[in-house]
């Protein structure tokens, strides 16, 4: 198992290669494999250029990427990430999230704890919500949000053009399974619908066919927050 | 439950033995110390002190230093070595454990299969080696000056050097205890600095003169053997000086076995307590 607890500091006078060599030795990685594993882990977190520079001058985001590399160094089956983006600036958060998403490609179980539910919605496939040490719910994100909203799901659609009433009516008339459409901001729509991933896929296909300049489509980050608040309220 | 012994297998990897874990911690902590600014600052302090002494003795030629080879080493080494030791201990040990909590460097190593006792011992040994280097530089400059003036090194200096190193061991044990006690580096460094530079000396003075009790329970009292061994004959156990107004001043001198026992007990007691504290402290 590999673990990353919050944002650890790394001894500033060491280089990433040395710090990771220390972890490799502690974890008993065979001597012949250490350099190869270190270089692979550093490559996974996109820090190849910095591998022999002193850590003391790194930003928090860079240090966190090295910490992620230390967690995956021994190629663990299970990776535990405890609030991996807490305390990072927006750039650092984006970098670390991108790396976590890329780690999902390799066959391993990643458990991530976070209070940032938009991050959970963005990165995770399944979610477990715990309140006062008690597991309230464990399911896919779409199922969790659907449970709380009575089977209703929400997606956010980003457009290249401005949203107006005519456009909303056009979508409502052409796309099936939609309950409501709201304008989030000038270029974003929030669509509520019933059903799971199949319905979500059908809606996307229908909107694409309308050729209205769709640039993004994803589960609404606020939906998970609403689900969380709904579930916690019921347990207070 | 993860059993962190040497037979544990982590995806085909054999976790190192406790001794190997100590070696790993020692290696990387020492690397960190040697590259750190604090090492060079301390080295510079030791060299500056030596340079000042070299100038003062060479320019003013004080009789107290140049009367004999023993008086030279007593004046040079006997007076300054304990200060260099305490300073080295504070620089390398003051935040060795508390810094792991305050700076969160502990979070980097602790999630891995390594015993806290291995971290503690590895860090302690690193601090001992780094401090020994500093003490060694100061001793080397002392010997070079001693050879210049007297062309010989008395065997008592060798004894004093050994006692000084033993004192360093005890001081680091004590400082590591305080470093484990606090989660704040500044607090652990300030408290130990106050104890060694002021509190122990003041308590020793009051206990010896007002209560007329031998201060055998104070570490700095035991360290007096470092200077005393350079005095021939060895100073008597109790020296009472009567002033003109009838005021008496009592000075106690520990015997060599007594001094070594005080240092040894301090080291064992504080090292064990410090280790227990570190084992039990939560990283929150």
Image: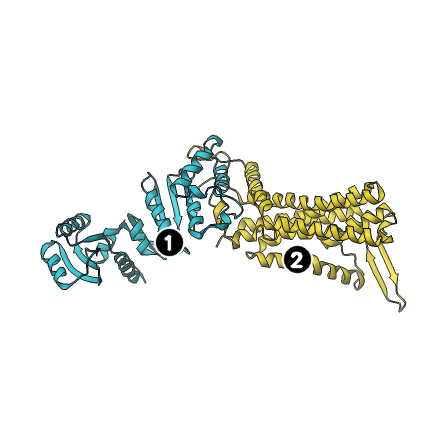
B60 with respect to B106 (left or right): right
- The residue lying furthest to the right in this view is B244
Q: What chain is tagged by disc 1?
A: A
CA gap, disc 2 and disc 1:
42 Å
Q: Secondary structure at mark 1?
A: helix
Residue at far top of view: A32
Say which chain is cyan: A
Assess disc 2: are there few (<14), some (14-19) or many (≥20) residues with their C-alpha within 10 Å of its C-alpha.
some
> Where is B161 relative to B246, above or below?
above
Q: Is residue A6 visible?
A: no
Q: Which mark is residue A91?
A: 1
Q: Secondary structure at mark 2?
A: helix
Q: Position of residue B230 (x, y in %)?
A: 82, 47
- Left or right: B6 as drawn, with respect to B38: left
Residue matched to label 2: B193
Asked whether A140 or B153 is in front, the reply is B153
Q: Quadrant of the N terminus of chain A?
A: top left
Residue located 34% across and 47% down the image = A98
Residue toward you, B260 or B53: B53
Residue at the limit of the structure toward the left, as seen here: A173
Q: Nearer the viewer, residue B105 or B242?
A: B105
Image quadrant occupied by the C terminus of chain A: bottom left
Query: Is residue B12 visible in this depiction of the protein?
Result: yes
Q: Colour of chain B?
A: yellow
Give left or right: position of B123 versus A84: right
Q: Nearer the viewer, mark 2 or mark 1?
A: 1
Q: Residue at x 40, y 55 (%)?
A: A86
Residue A186 in the image: state x and y as whole percent: 22, 62
């Amino acid at each position: 198992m590999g673990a990353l607890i919050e944002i650890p500091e790394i001894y500033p006078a060491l280089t990433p290669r040395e710090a990771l060599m220390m972890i490799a030795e502690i974890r008993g990685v065979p001597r012949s494999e250490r350099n190869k594993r270190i270089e692979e882990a550093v490559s996974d977190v996109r820090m190849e250029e910095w591998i022999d520079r002193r850590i003391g001058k790194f930003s928090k985001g860079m240090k966190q990427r090295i910490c992620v590399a230390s967690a995956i160094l021994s190629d663990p089956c299970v990776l535990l990430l405890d609030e991996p983006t807490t305390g990072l600036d927006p750039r650092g958060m984006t970098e670390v999230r991108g790396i976590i998403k890329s780690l999902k490609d390799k066959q391993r179980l990643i458990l991530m704890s976070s209070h940032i539910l938009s991050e959970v919605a963005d990165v995770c496939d399944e979610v477990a919500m715990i309140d006062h040490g008690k597991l309230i719910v464990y399911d896919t994100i779409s199922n969790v949000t659907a449970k709380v909203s009575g089977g209703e799901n929400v997606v956010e659609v980003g457009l290249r053009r401005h949203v107006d009433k005519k456009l909303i009516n056009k979508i409502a008339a052409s796309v099936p399974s939609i309950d409501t459409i709201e304008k989030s901001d000038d270029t974003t729509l929030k669509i509520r619908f019933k059903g799971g991933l199949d319905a979500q896929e059908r809606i996307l296909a229908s909107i694409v066919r309308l050729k209205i300049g769709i640039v993004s489509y994803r589960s609404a980050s606020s939906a998970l927050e609403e689900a969380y608040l709904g579930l916690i309220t019921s347990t207070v | 439950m993860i059993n962190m012994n040497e037979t544990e297998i982590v995806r085909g990897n054999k976790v190192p033995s406790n001794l190997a874990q100590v070696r790993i911690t020692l290696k990387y902590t020492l690397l960190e110390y040697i590259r750190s600014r604090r090492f060079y600052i301390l080295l510079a302090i030791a060299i500056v002190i030596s340079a000042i002494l070299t100038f003062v003795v060479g320019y003013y030629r004080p009789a107290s230093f140049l009367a004999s080879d023993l008086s030279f080493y007593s004046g040079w080494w006997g007076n300054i070595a304990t200060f260099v030791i305490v300073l080295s201990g504070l620089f390398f040990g003051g935040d060795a454990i508390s810094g792991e909590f305050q700076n969160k460097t502990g979070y980097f190593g602790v999630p891995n299969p390594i015993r806290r006792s291995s971290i503690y011992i590895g860090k302690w040994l690193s601090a001992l080696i780094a401090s020994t280097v500093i003490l060694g530089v100061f001793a080397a400059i002392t010997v070079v000056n001693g050879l210049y003036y007297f062309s010989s090194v008395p065997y008592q200096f060798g004894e004093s050097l050994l006692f000084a190193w033993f004192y360093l061991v005890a001081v680091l044990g004590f400082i590591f205890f305080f470093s484990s006690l606090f989660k704040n580096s500044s607090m652990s460094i300030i408290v130990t600095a106050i104890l060694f530079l002021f509190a122990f000396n003041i308590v020793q003075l009051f206990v010896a003169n007002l209560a007329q009790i031998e201060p055998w329970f104070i570490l700095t009292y035991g360290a007096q053997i470092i200077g005393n061994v350079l005095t021939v004959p060895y100073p008597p156990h109790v020296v009472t000086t009567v002033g003109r107004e009838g005021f008496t001043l009592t000075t106690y001198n520990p015997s060599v076995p007594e001094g070594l026992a005080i240092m040894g007990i301090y080291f064992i007691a504080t090292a064990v307590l410090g280790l227990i504290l570190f084992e039990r402290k939560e990283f929150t």
